[in-house]
Amino acid sequence: MSASTTPSSRPAVTEREAREVAEAAREQHWRKPSFAKELFLGRFRLDLIHPHPLPADEAAQRGEEFLAKLRDFVETKVDAALIEREARIPDEVIDGLKELGAFGMKIDTKYGGLGLTQVYYNKALSLAGSASPAIGVLLSAHQSIGVPQPLKLFGTQEQKERFLPRCARTDISAFLLTEPDVGSDPARLATSAVPDGDDYVLDGVKLWTTNGVVADLLVVMARVPRSEGHKGGITAFVVETNSPGVTVENRNAFMGLRGIENGVTRFHQVRVPAANRVGEEGQGLKIALTTLNTGRLSLPASCVAAGKWCLKIAREWSAAREQWGKPVAHHEAVGSKISFIAATTFALEAVTDLASQMADEDRNDIRIEGALAKLYASEMAWTMADELVQIRGGRGFETAESLRARGERGVPAEQLLRDLRINRIFEGSTEIMHLLIAREAVDAHLSVAGDLIDPEKSLGEKARAGAGAGVFYAKWLPRLIAGPGQLPATYGEFKHGVDLSGHLRYVERTARKLARSTFYAMSRWQGRMESKQGFLGRIVDIGAELFAMSAACVRAELLRSQGDHGREAYQLADVFCRQSRIRIEELFNRLWTNTDDLDRKVVKGVLSGTYEWLERGIVDPSGDGPWIADATPGPSQKENVHRPIR
């Protein structure tokens, strides 16, 4: 097939075909233990996370030394108000970060990077993101999902030697998967990579390319057509942004993260050497998903920073602001919000540090833990920021610039709320994360009983699956009846002044209850289980709370054993667990008592126009234009707004 061949139109795929594409990209086997996977199966494996793993002394020293340098830089060189006002990170700040080595934090020292662990990389992102969330996103998009991570996991030695030194010091990278009409359904991906001699020729349009406006190197996901000698499928490529035919057509603007360099990138007849292909043809989605297993941990790091800042502002403001004769913090309505922020920040840091250290040790499979951390942190950080705005009252709704202009401290609470909102959407929306985690959580069930509920399977295959399932459940179900969570003395090592052992016993009992609920649902709905997204989401949310409770208790005991605010840590863990238990009980109640069926009927009515009368009496200010921009392949008709920083 020649390079001039017109790329095919967007693939038309059925729901089943889309699921098959996603399933093929998913890691199929569990070669290492997983705390979260066991939790969803009703087995509380405290031994996998306690005693809390710790970084090696040398790694900790290297990390602390860099954090000190980074703190000095962001305190003296970063003007967060300027970035927000001008919606751009100054070039000199980016250059300073390059000189500091911040773009090579996760890159091995033999390629010119700093070789930081995941734990210290996340601490650095928290620190940088607290100074300006846009800087945290710049560094994270470059290293967590940009060129360095895919090459670290799947690149050839030659690719590592060519690209990683550049990424460590001079070049900025970006990750390109999303298209104007393709988000979480990659089966419909239309960007093509047509083989032509020793090259591939790329055509297509990519949307929301974070760092894309300033990037020098791109990781691009494109579809290779099947042909003689080519397996085809979605494939990953490293592309030089200055290649002929690459055009950054637009710098996108958002409600928050105003300083990020996010754009629309068009590829027209872009020649990419076969040597720049990462992995084999058809491995692109697997590369993307594997990269995100640890890449997602950068997002909880930013949420931890947000929680810490919310706590600082809430403490200082609530002590200074008086109403009815006493500081507002002493009024229960405000105090409960402060308690929630403090306890949740402690838990988020516990979850993030634990998952990060587990990633560093590589003893456990953390695909579920990483996804749970992203899901839970993004939801809870948003709630904390919303509570801070409420605590600040009218000042929380007022911009920092306006506050400064009239002589008050410029507290950007409303900006934090805007900046955090995207976390519930990108790197897997909350809804997609629910489904992704649910799929992994029921993997053991589907592996033994999946053929029973698959309409495509023959009677013979169903019979064999039934026999296998019978053996599995005969052993598994009895173990869900009783466990150490029912013994009063269990986990006694977590009792020091404040008693956390009861919370861990609750986790053990509730994990078994969660597994029983999942089994009951599979028995009830069978093949329709995958459509019960409300139910699955609640199952996952319960698991996330149990993971957070476990992490909080383990972190409290670690701090106590180190003599580092152990008493206070136990208090925070206790309060968090009590708050979490209330949320868990509500979620369990909503598993079976909800409006899911009624909601589906209303949705059908809304889409059919039954309730269109309800929309009367308004003016729609959004104007005309297509819902989804045209992404037909072809030469660009727009000015190239690519802005490399050198």
Image (cartoon, rainbow, N blue to C red):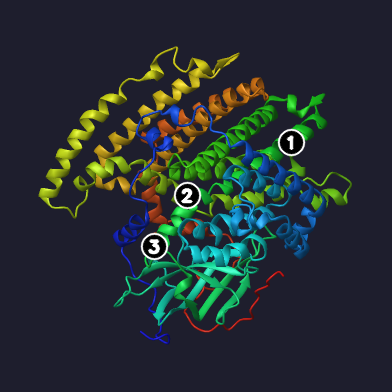
- Choose between 46 and 639: the one closer to the eye: 46
Query: Which residue bears the numbered disc 2?
Result: 293
In space, the residues marked 2 and 1 are separated at their CA atoms by 31 Å
Q: Tell whether 67 sits left or right of 265.
A: right
Query: Which residue bears the numbered disc 3?
Result: 283
Of the two numbered discs 2 and 1 in the rendering, the one whose residue sits closer to the viewer: 2
Q: Residue 225: image x %, image y %?
A: 35, 75
In primary-sequence order, the first of circles 2 and 1 is 2
For this orientation, the residue located farthest to the left is 460
Q: Residues within 10 Å of mark 1 (few under 14, many from 20)?
A: some
Question: Who's the residue at 65% across and 68% down the image?
Answer: 214
In the rendered image, is residue 560 in sight? yes
Q: Are marks 3 and 1 in contact (CB under 8 Å)?
A: no
The quadrant of the image that shows the N terminus is bottom left
Secondary structure at numbered mark 3: loop
Query: Which residue bears the numbered disc 1?
Result: 312
Secondary structure at numbered mark 2: helix
Q: Residue 642: image x %, image y %?
A: 65, 74
In primary-sequence order, the first of circles 3 and 1 is 3
